[in-house]
Image (cartoon, rainbow, N blue to C red):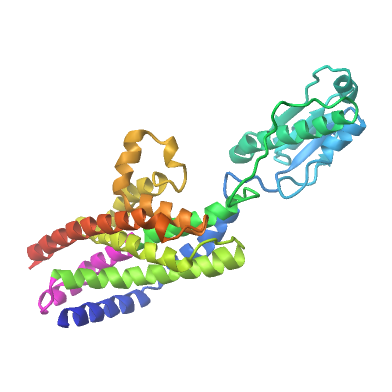
Amino acid sequence: MQTLLNIFHLGVKELRSLARDRLMLVLIAFAFTGQVYLTATGLPGALHKAPIAVVDEDRSPLSYRIGNAFYPPYFQTPAVIDPYAADPGLDIGLYTFVLDIPPDFQRDMLAGRAPAIQVNVDATRMSQAFIGNNYIQNIVNGEVAAFLQGHRAPFVFPAELEIRARFNPNLEPMWFGSVMEVINSVTMLSIILTGAALIREREHGTIEHLLVMPLTPFEIMMAKVWSMGLVVAVAATASVVFVVQGILKVPIEGSIGLFVAGMALHLFAATSMGIFLGTVARSMPQMGLLMIIVLLPLQMLSGGMTPRESMPEAVRNLMLAAPTTHFVALAQAILYRGAGVETVWPQFLALLGIGGVFFVLALSRFRKTIGSMG
């Protein structure tokens, strides 16, 4: 009973210490509000209101139809310009795409020829240039095919694909990006807060005060784990409810309570990792450098940015030891696909096991660190 009281009071001390650190509070608030919103609405893979111009040298019904097929939210309303304004518009960054429809385009199409439409792209805008080419090609092909159906006998394909996108019917990148940013912030802040809490004790000299008290390393470590984990869990839950669901209008299919339960297990592992790093680093600058080395693989190779199936097999197997891999999997299953406990229990068990291993390693390192200081 005394151990639980010690852990509770030490955790309250950590919360009070965090409350006096205004810069850290601002970081937490921004990570789960502004950062989530900016990342979700400004994803590089999303084409949103791209500036486009059309050079219509044909002036036919088909060319008008193609020019009118580009509209928000993917493109801005096309500007109709003459051929001499295309290059200057691209040079000054006025347009990202310039579509040049050649003379007699409709006549050549009806005659069965294969006329070409020139698309000039400002490739300095890499993200829009890459994805916009596919959008333009699909739009032009669709409009030409629809136009020709009214002038020729329709070609009957032996099989027709009926494409249905599940869980994200409109393929909105914001639905994916917002939740993934919350997950990344959970991992980042849980490691930073616990590691910084330990380093702050050393820099302020309060670690010596703890050493003279009848406290065990287990109690000191558990206090930091539950207090910093609680802060991140509350902030992340509020972000999902008020920012993701409320402001961004992203539908959450599954149980937020089940997601919070999985997040608690992930926080157990991530905070233990933060304490381990805090025992390795001797100052906050060293902690910052270690964070770069640790966070980048955790975030980039966990399946939150690219599918794990596209990674080399060795990387996939190695990342099974990382808690973020299982947390991303259960978060996507619960929040996107409405999965229940019967689906995500393997990830829950994996997080519990990985968290236990990290906790033991961190506690062992923490005991050695305190022993050397005593």
**Residue 16, position as x, y percentages in the image:** 32, 79
Q: Residue at x 37, y 33 (%)?
A: 312
Q: Is residue 34 left or right of residue 216?
A: right
Position in image of residue 173 (x %, y %): 59, 50
Residue at (23, 59) in percent of width and height = 356
Report the label total: 0
Question: Residue 283 appears in which quarter of the rendering?
Answer: bottom left
Q: Can residue 345 be seen?
A: yes
Q: Nearer the viewer, residue 208 or 114?
A: 114
On screen, residue 346 versus residue 10, left or right, reads right
Task: Give the image location of residue 360, x and y in percent.
Answer: 18, 59
Residue depicted at 31% across the width and 49% down the height: 322
Residue 163's place in the image compared with 1, above or below, is above
Residue at 69%, 37% (x, y): give it.
135
Q: Is residue 102 above or below residue 88?
A: above
**Which quadrant of the figure contains the N terminus?**
bottom left
Residue interval drawn in magenta: 191-216
Residue 284 seen anywhere in this rendered image of the structure: no
Location of residue 143 by image quarter: top right
359 to the left or right of 369: right
Whether residue 83 appears in magenta in the rendering, the answer is no
Taken as a whole, is the magenta stretch helix, strand or loop? Answer: helix
Camera-side residue of 209 and 39: 39
Q: Is residue 106 above or below residue 260?
A: above
